[in-house]
Image: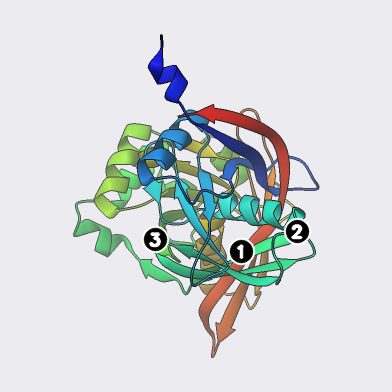
Amino acid sequence: MNTQANTARQATVEVVHGFVDGGTGGNPAGVILDADELSEQDMQDIAARVGLSETAFVSRSETEGFKLDFFTPNRRIAHCGHATIAAFSHLDALGRIPNPDTSKETVDGPRRILMKEGAAYMEQLAPRYSGVEEWAKKGVKIDDVLNSLGIDNSQIDRRFPPLLVNTGNSFIVVGLSNARALANVKPDYAKITQISEQLDLIGYYVFTNDPLATSRDATTRMFAPRYAIEEEAATGMAAGPLACVLHDFGDSSQRSFQIKQGVFMNPASPSLIKVDLEVEDGAISGLMAGGYGKVARSLQIAF
């Protein structure tokens, strides 16, 4: 008798695409509701079996609207944009969000969530920037970052110096001068992982706002091999930092941005992330990043 098979538990996982664009594309996340009885190890095991870039576990919160725990296939992550949008879009479709102004409890503290016409928006913090001189203190040079992407200094958009930006999670944001440069990026995942460990990053967010590449404010690619994500179709927690860079370094008074992602993946999965900046006395004080989610399928996972 296989006692292990007899004692295995089952979890129902909804695969919800976050940040869909016109109802298609987006980034798939696992969403598990009523996860109160699951341990951290259970969550990690389930996320590994689901195999998507992130899985969100939704449970009761004593202080906020809901508690959310996020796991990649290999570790916990404090925040995840597309999984947040996926989870709250799904909860809203089920009629489980009584107040459109709600919140999530996370291991990194509470964050505001706003539901608006079926879209979910999540709060991020005011940006903190760290330039190449700060990276050097941890053994990382700008050439190391460029080499890890297979690009050189001539391809950088001079308006936007590469920066480490944190609005809740840390990303290196790299602006490229044109669409061809973005399409031809050749990530060295081992090098990106090493640099991500040294600087405690989620990963890189590489973008261009070349009008030949996108009708939006920017189009992007995201690489996070440290978290077992080679390339991701939509990353709300990176789109927030990018919107801050576009505002603060692009000499722009614009406060709302539309950011495209997933176009250069194979296969492509075009996604749309909307970011609204909150600006006080000329400085960004916070932001809301959001979009739409769409349920794709349901899975039964044994763990």
Sequence-earlier tag: 1 or 3: 3
Residue 257, label in figure: none
Q: Residue at x 70, y 33 (%)?
A: 297
Which residue is labeled 2 in the image?
Answer: 95
Which residue is labeled 3 in the image?
Answer: 107
Marks 2 and 1, how far apart in space? 22 Å
Residue 210 % position (x, y): 65, 52
Question: Observer-nearest residue: 203 or 135?
Answer: 203
Q: Residues within 10 Å of mark 2 (few under 14, many from 20)?
A: few
Q: Secondary structure at mark 2?
A: loop
Find the residue positioned furthest to the top: 1
Residue 228 % position (x, y): 41, 35
Residue 86 % position (x, y): 64, 50
In the displayed structure, 113 sits above or below 96; it is below
Q: Nearer the viewer, mark 2 or mark 3?
A: 2
Give the residue type that dot 3 points to: Val
Give the residue type that dot 2 points to: Gly
Which residue is labeled 1 in the image?
Answer: 289
| Image quarter in which the N terminus is found | top left
Question: Observer-nearest residue: 144 or 264?
Answer: 264
In the displayed structure, 246 sits above or below 221; it is below
Q: Residues within 10 Å of mark 1 (few under 14, many from 20)?
A: many
